[in-house]
Image (cartoon, helix red, strand yellow):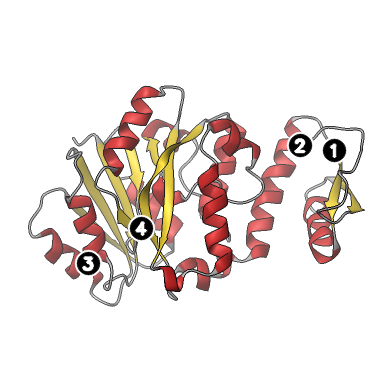
């Protein structure tokens, strides 16, 4: 049994998957196995991966009909036997020290349930300005306290950078297979369960930007889908704390959307028009 099972779902990733394998093969930490789940590829991705592995017994390939990334992840989770599950995407690259540093971080912090790392987007000409700003914001969040504090802003950790204690992943029920971002849902579920997520303050993961990324094409990754996942978890968190009425500060369509999303989940949400940059509003209550 390996110490780390790397879980990699893929569909039609033939242009990149060999490079992803090579980045794993160069890891200085060698006690890993790749659980690669072919989610209905039609471009020969699995054959490309097998050729790159060239008989390496650390490759464990599972083929399933196309059902989406969350279902593929849950199928791969059934194959996991290691105490740590690391994530990776088929179009990205891992730094040679990535797995070793993540394993060491979990050893040094037994109170952490999961750990990620900083990321670098590449190639630079393909990176939109908003994505660069997002990565810079996310890379500033390193401690469990900072990651928890910003949890409803956006995904605070790039999902594919994570190494997770297998028991924490199983205890949370694996990945959500609904119509929305499974990575944000998992992070918010962990926070509600009291799990602590940290980050190695170093770039250990290279996140490839290209036009075929699911984040650019999928209806599961729209602003509306993200807001619905946030609202679902926020409403549950408020209910657990006995809070049934909130004030939402914002403007225009975004303010109306958030008010409606929470109202649909039984939260009485009072909108308050406020533009960032104005003085900080005063109110009596609790800031989550």
Neighbor class of circle 4 (other Cα within 10 Å; few <14, some 14-19, many 20+) is: many
Q: What element carries label 4?
A: loop
The label shown at residue 238 is: 2
Q: Residue at x 42, y 64 (%)?
A: 67
Of mark 2 and mark 3, the one earlier in the sequence is 3
Of mark 1 and mark 4, the one earlier in the sequence is 4
Q: Do the residues labelled 1 and 3 touch (CB within 8 Å)?
A: no
Rounded to the nearest whole Å, what is the CA distance between mark 1 and mark 3? 50 Å
Q: Residue at x 63, y 58 (%)?
A: 226
Q: Check disc 4 and report the residue beneath it.
A: 89
Rounded to the nearest whole Å, what is the CA distance between mark 2 and mark 3? 45 Å
**Residue 79 appears in the figure:** no
When the figure is inspected, residue 96 is found, relative to residue 238, above or below; the finding is: below
Of mark 4 and mark 2, the one earlier in the sequence is 4
Q: Is label 4 or label 2 in front?
A: 4
Q: Are marks 1 and 2 in contact (CB under 8 Å)?
A: yes
Q: Is mark 2 on a helix, strand or loop?
A: helix
């Amino acid at each position: 049994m390996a110490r780390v099972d790397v879980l990699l779902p893929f569909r039609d990733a033939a242009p990149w998957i060999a490079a992803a394998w090579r980045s794993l093969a160069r890891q200085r930490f060698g006690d890993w196995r790749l659980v690669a789940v072919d989610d209905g590829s039609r471009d020969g991705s699995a054959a490309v991966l097998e050729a790159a592995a060239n008989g390496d017994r650390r490759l464990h390939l599972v083929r399933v009909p196309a059902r989406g990334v969350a279902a593929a992840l849950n199928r791969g989770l059934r194959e996991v036997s290691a105490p740590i599950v690391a994530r990776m995407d088929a179009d990205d690259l891992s730094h040679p020290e990535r797995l070793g540093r993540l394993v060491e971080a979990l050893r040094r912090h037994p109170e952490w349930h999961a750990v990620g790392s900083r990321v670098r987007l590449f190639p630079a000409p393909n990176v939109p300005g908003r994505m660069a700003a997002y990565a810079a914001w996310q890379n500033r969040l390193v401690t469990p306290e900072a990651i928890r504090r910003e949890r409803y802003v956006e995904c605070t950790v790039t999902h594919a950078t994570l190494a997770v204690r297998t028991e924490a992943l199983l205890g949370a029920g694996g990945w959500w297979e609904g119509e929305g971002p499974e990575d944000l849902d998992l992070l918010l579920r962990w926070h509600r369960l009291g799990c602590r997520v940290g980050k190695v303050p170093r770039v250990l993961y290279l996140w490839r930007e290209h036009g075929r990324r699911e984040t650019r094409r999928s209806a599961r990754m729209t602003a509306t889908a993200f807001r619905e996942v946030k609202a679902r978890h926020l409403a549950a968190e408020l209910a657990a704390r006995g809070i049934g009425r909130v004030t939402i500060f914002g403007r225009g369509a975004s303010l109306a959307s958030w008010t409606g999303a929470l109202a649909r989940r039984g939260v009485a949400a009072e909108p308050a028009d406020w533009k960032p940059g104005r003085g900080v509003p005063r109110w009596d209550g609790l800031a989550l």
